[in-house]
Image (cartoon, rainbow, N blue to C red):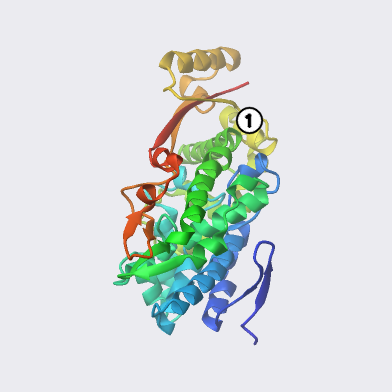
Amino acid sequence: MNKLKILNDPIYGFITIPNSLIFDLIQHKYFQRLRRITQMGMSHLVYPGAHHTRFHHAIGCVHLMQKAINILRFKGVTISKEEEEALYIAILLHDIGHGPFSHAMEHSIVSGISHEQISLLFMERLNVEFNGSLTLAIKIFKGEYERPFMCQLISSQLDIDRADYLKRDSFYTGVAEGNVNSERLITMLNVIDDNLVVEEKGIYSVEKFIIARRFMYWQVYLHKTGLVAEQLLIRVLSRAKALTNNGVKLHASTPLKYFLQNDISLESFTNKTLDIFYELDDYDIVSAMKEWKYHDDFVLRNLCDMVINRDLLKIKIKNKPIKALSLEKHINALIKKHSISKSDATYFVFSDEIHHQAYQTKKQNINILYKSGKIQDIVKASDHLNLKALSKPVTKYYICYPK
């Protein structure tokens, strides 16, 4: 069977699968599941084109990793065949543990377990199946390999993951400001003392990258409509779990039922749980919500109706914390209107905060390499006044309540 396939990607054109192991991993049922996991959660309710999947993104990352390895080798960095393959595997599988709609599940029906931890469980399981051929990839993914630049290519402030998702998300949303020149960024990469650096002439591309990231977060990923939709989805799943715990029978697919009926944490995430998790995707949640729209429970019925029909709560974003009085006012109005309990009302009236820091000065800095051999952090190297401001964390506050 020909395993060196070529895929057509709307962003990069033709992508070649580098070797037969990568092909076998792509063909595996665990990875094929990513075709049914939306890359951008509920963002399609704001940007109708944002229906691309985690599958798209992972394949794009492998393509960029091929470019990065070729560039670094061209510049004299030694990367063995084993390391090359491990880098492809690590970047291909870095998102394999995402649940339905990408992040909603982490905050509702499983507790204290992140998608990175589930990705690792999948990788360890696949490593057994593929006779240990993922061992080095797992080491790199965990950040434990002795050549730090390889770990930085997978996860850092200028990694292959970000280089693909910013470009891809900007393409599918139509938000041009997020479009980074990922190929130029990769061409400017180099390695000094086994750490990733960007050559001096790539400094403006890095500035654009950081600014594009800030823009995409505030305009797209934390867009108020997408934010309220995701919060409603989290509340749908939390309510369904609470009702199930109280003995209420809900129509749901077998995998979704399992996660509603059991308290799942990292300790209880067995191989059996992993096999059930692999069956769970966006379709389970959507079909469940279509059923639950007609349920007797006031909260579940109305939450599902809001998400399915995009008739969402009103949301206001402010620069100062939301006053308790304001929250109380909306809660009381809802209680009075529908004769529901205060705890039920809090599913529809709530406040929280959102944070974003476009560049973190204390975390795996983006270093610029000068011709003289000097290495300097991008904030110091840049003559762009905004970069200093972009390295400060920004917090905003929001309140949601019925229209």
* Residue 63 higher or lower than 235, as above or below: below
Name the amino acid, label 1.
Leu
Give the side of residue 369 with respect to residue 289, left or right: left
Percent coordinates x, y for residue 149 in the rendering: 36, 67
Residue drawn at x 49%, y 74% is: 71
Q: Nearer the viewer, residue 47 or 399?
A: 47
Residue drawn at x 59%, y 77% is: 17
How packed mark 1 is, by other alpha carbons closer than 10 Å (few <14, some 14-19, many 20 or more), is many
Percent coordinates x, y for residue 87 in the rendering: 44, 72
Residue 115, visible in the rendered structure: yes
Q: Nearer the viewer, residue 295 or 249?
A: 295
Q: Which residue is mark 1?
A: 312
Give the side of residue 361 with respect to residue 127, left or right: left
* Residue 103 higher or lower than 9, as above or below: above
Q: Nearer the viewer, residue 351 or 221?
A: 221
Quadrant where the N terminus is found in the figure: bottom right
